[in-house]
Image (cartoon, grey):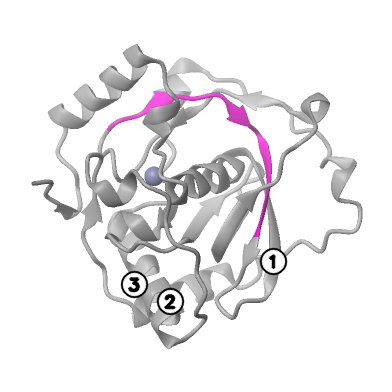
Amino acid sequence: MAQQDSARQAAEGTPAAETPEPAESGEDLEFLDDTADAEERERAHRERGTARPITVVGNPVLHRRCQDVTEFDDKLTQLIDDMFASQRAAEGVGLAANQIGVDLRVFVYDCPDDDGVRHVGAICNPVIEELPAESRVLDESNEGCLSVPTAYAPLARPDYAVCRGQDAQGKPVVVRGTGYFARCLQHETDHLDGYLYIDRLSKRDRKDALRQMAEGTPRYETVPND
Ligand code: ZN
């Protein structure tokens, strides 16, 4: 996911949504602490990795469900390092494997939450937990995607998300996020299901986002579509 569109957001004066207390559904969930040593962990990953060019809307790998991760081996570790390097090179806050052309259900993130706290991690085989409708608060902030370079559009999403999956060793993990990080967890899981955020927009907003992309120039290397 692209960085927050802060300039435009400030101009529009989007009010910060009230964050509800976490839903009661997951009483005894052990949430992963993905905030400790965030800076050091992110740096270590990207220094071991190599940045790769980013696939853009229209590339088939972005428009189909990715394969489950079944081998938690050195190859996966290297992929995750490359994804952190690619995410940093493109100045993103989240990146799914198919955004560097790899058909595998894993995403990485380096994203601030509602309180400005930095979260860093990698999740394999992610699933977003359904929240009870009564605890759902929609946040209508702008959203952007490295695979739709230079475009932003407002998109309503729940401002709290719980994502289940596995870490790079295959151990089950549960991550929760608020604010922009909640948006990121949903956005990256969508990628691995074969959907871009523009697929959730109205026809008109989607067209506008594609126009912004056509008029802009990405600040990072992309994979040309045939
Ligand atoms: Zn994206």
Residue 129, image quadrant:
top right
Image check: 217 left or right of 104?
Answer: left
Name the amino acid, label 2. Answer: His
Question: Disc 2 and disc 1: Cα gap in Å?
Answer: 19 Å
Residue 137 appears in the picture as rendered: yes
Question: Disc 3 and disc 2: Cα gap in Å?
Answer: 8 Å
Q: Which residue is drawn at the image coordinates 39% and 38% (left, top)?
A: 196
Image marks 1 and 3: residues in contact by CB distance under 8 Å: no
Q: Which residue is drawn at the image coordinates 41% and 64% (left, top)?
A: 104
Residue that mark 1 sits on: 173
Could you classify mark 3 by the number of other residues whose Cα lies within 10 Å: few (under 14), some (14-19), or many (20 or more)? many
Q: What span is colored magenta in the figure?
A: 151-164
Closest to the camera, between mark 3 and mark 2, is: 3
Residue 65 pos. (x, y %): 43, 50
Q: Secondary structure at mark 1?
A: strand
**Disc nearer the start of the sequence (3/2):** 2
Residue that mark 3 sits on: 82
Name the amino acid, label 1. Answer: Val
**Eyeballing the image, is 112 above or below 103?**
above
**Disc nearer the start of the sequence (2/1):** 2
Residue 189 pos. (x, y %): 52, 49
**52 is within the stretch colored magenta:** no
Closest to the camera, between mark 1 and mark 3, is: 1
Q: Nearer the viewer, residue 99 or 195?
A: 195
